[in-house]
Image (tube, rainbow, N blue to C red):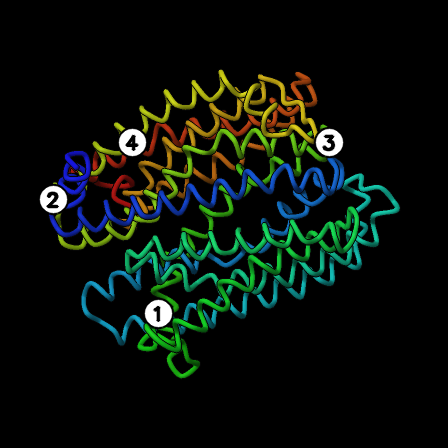
Amino acid sequence: MKAIERIKAILFKGNTRSVRVKKNVLLTILIKVAGMLIGFIYMPLSLDYLGQIKFGIFLTMLSIIDWFLNFDIGIGQGLRNKFGESVVRKGNRDAVYYVSTAYFVLGAIIAAVTVTLLILNFSLPWASWLNIPLDLQSEVKILGAIIIIAFGIRFIAGNIYEIFYAMQKMAYVEFFQFLSKATFLVFILLIPFIATESLLLFGAANSLTFALVPLIVGLYYFSSKFSAYRPSVKYVKMKYFKDLFSLSSKFFLIKIAMLIIHQTNNILIALFVSLESVPQYEAAYKYMSIFMLLFVILNNQLWPSNTEAYAKGDLVWMKKMMRALLKIWFATLVLATLMVVISPFVYELWFQKTPLYIPMAISISVAVSICLTTWVNMYNIVLNGTGKIKLQMYTWLFAAFINIPISLFLVEVIDLGVVGIVLGTVASLIPLAIVAPIQVNKILSKKDIGIWAK
């Protein structure tokens, strides 16, 4: 009983914003853990059903199409900030204008990208470029079309999640994402009874599940609790697009840079190492990124909270949160070290039915990459919340520019294989790890002038 009372005291201590953050983070962690468990269950099931080569093909295809369909010019992140600011100011009219304009513009962009990708999918011999076996290429082309359409739906429908984030209801988003994972797990368990090693059936089930859940969520909430913000063509205003675009364009360039750094690894490994090596990297990344998910949770919750705090001039609260984040980061550093040490035993237990050998060097390099990523993301929470992202944008673009050349040098010249690809990511993140803390410290001490204030 004393332990429960102590937990309640911790949860309800502080101002309204702090209490809201702690309750949301705790609930989200519980849902996230459940989702992670499902993810760990369907990774070996997927590998066992498809085999290492087909599973490598599927992961590589997701990476390619995910990369292209992020050309949304950062509308989602811009909507999160602008919608959140409007709600704080009690500006419901502005809020519905931002929502309608964001959905319309994003819908037009993604529709154009989707059509373009469908044309390219059937006209270019991209399957042979990825060294996909000849007998699988026609099946892969059909699956590519399904994934493209599903991702188009998912990216437009996913804007409903940005509204939940802006309203600091992050736990809702985590629940809906958990629901997507749980539904896909059911499909994985059923598919073997329908067809054997069907890459097409497996990929279609995955992509359509993660597309239809946010679509259904959006249709339900815009017809009920969020009816005041329901998007409509009559509320699309170019003035609001300019407001969104001024911030969104920077978020867009940052997102593209992030994709180049983080989402090209599977593609580079498939092209310059081997398809069989893609599941090795993916498994190590999924395992080592467990603690990284905590920073994803904190980012999604603290981003709108920082937007609110900065709008109200509450820098004391922002400093307090930054100190708490630093303590959490150092704790995850210790956890990452422990996870690397026990990784061989975990992999052996995890992939009992279909053994997957993952060298220790891959686990170590992935752990370093993730620790550096969480360090950068920790400071970006403040930068994103304040909207001062111009310097961050420049640094991310520089990091993206050097990422692939360094990775290829380490693979082709030094012959480091998968480890070389990951170390390319590490090297490109170092400038960000230096610049971001300096800018945040200047902002929180009101010494941000010149480029540091942008």
Mark 3 surroundings: few (<14), some (14-19) or many (≥20) residues within 10 A: some
Q: What label does residue 14 carry, if any?
A: 2
Dot 1 falls on a residue whose secondary structure is helix
Closer to the N terminus: mark 1 or mark 2? 2
Marks 3 and 2, Cα distance to the nearest angstrom?
51 Å
Q: Which image quarter is the N terminus in? A: top left
From the image, state whether disc 2 or disc 4 is nearer to you.
2
According to the picture, the residue beneath numbered tag 4 turns out to be 437
Marks 3 and 1, Cα distance to the nearest angstrom?
45 Å
Dot 4 falls on a residue whose secondary structure is helix
User: Residue 241: where, in percent of width, then height?
Assistant: 39, 68
Mark 1 surroundings: few (<14), some (14-19) or many (≥20) residues within 10 A: many
According to the picture, the residue beneath numbered tag 3 turns out to be 276
Residue 358 located left or right of residue 318:
right
Closer to the N terminus: mark 1 or mark 4? 1
Q: Amino acid at mark 2?
A: Gly
Mark 2 surroundings: few (<14), some (14-19) or many (≥20) residues within 10 A: few
